[in-house]
Amino acid sequence: MNGKLYLIVGPSGAGKGTIIEGIKQNFPDIIFPLSCTTREMRPTEKPGQVYFFISKKEFMKRIENHEFLEWAHVHGRDSFYGTLKAPILKALHSNKKILREVDIQGAQSIRELIPAKNLCTIFITVPDWSILENRILRRCQMSHEELTKRKLSFIKEMEFARECDFIVHSNEGKITKAINEVIKIINK
């Protein structure tokens, strides 16, 4: 197995999705596996682009069948996210490069299953919580309670950054620079 799995990790609103879109334009051969989620689809999303939107019942069945490389209950909501195992392992055995966005729980789970030589964790960060808060609120309406949960997640995620192989800063107005930094990492 000589493929490489690049995990994009970081707080919600840090720019992970935008960076991944930038990478897609520069790496036509890289594999971008989709996640499964039970959360509601946002107005700007379409099924099969970033997520497979499935029922909680189907998600639980896939857990029972050991179909996920990792899965998690995220942000204290009644939402589950998971990365299907089969497409990742197939790509690694085919010596492919794979780029996948996961949360810190997912990254930790994947580290236990994928050899270090086949794995690279890239943490996307912002300078401080206020920038992240503004990005989140621009993207969707959110209750004060949900925003507080996101802030607590942000603090925990920032602690995890030290455990990652690389840290990339997603500063306001400089997303191209962040995309280029990730491209350099993938090209190493």
Image: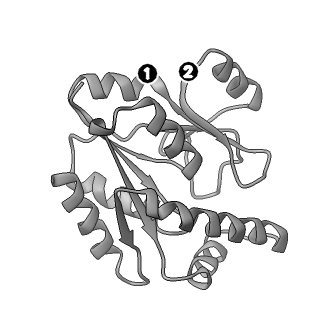
Determine the residue positioned at 68% across, 28% down: 59
Give above or below for 70 relative to 77. above
Q: Left or right of 135: which side holds 15?
A: left
Q: Give the residue number, with chain letter if any, for mark 1.
A: 86
Q: Is residue 65 visible?
A: yes
Q: Secondary structure at mark 1?
A: helix
The residue lying at 56 percent from left, 41 percent from top is 47
Q: Is residue 133 left or right of residue 144?
A: left
* Residue 163 percent across, percent down from the top left: 44, 57
| In the foreground, 120 or 138 | 120
Q: Measuring from the top left, give residue 89's x and y in whole percent.
A: 37, 24
Disc marking residue 67:
2
Q: In the rendered image of this protein, does residue 31 appear above or below residue 13?
A: above
Q: Residue furthest top?
A: 65
Q: What's under tag 1, amino acid-wise?
A: Ala
* Proximity of marks 1 and 2: CB atoms separated by less than 8 Å: yes
Query: Which amino acid, mark 2?
Result: Glu
Q: Secondary structure at mark 2?
A: loop
Q: Earlier in the sequence, mark 1 or mark 2?
A: 2
Tell me if 15 is positioned left or right of 20 in this view.
Answer: right
Q: CA distance from mark 1 to mark 2?
A: 7 Å
> Which of the pair 168/99 is nearer the observer?
168
Quadrant that contains the N terminus: top left
State whether residue 11 appears in this view.
no
Q: Position of residue 186 (x, y in %)?
A: 22, 52
Question: Callout 1 environment at 10 Å: few (<14), some (14 to 19), or many (20+)?
Answer: few
Residue 29 at what x, y percent from top left?
21, 40
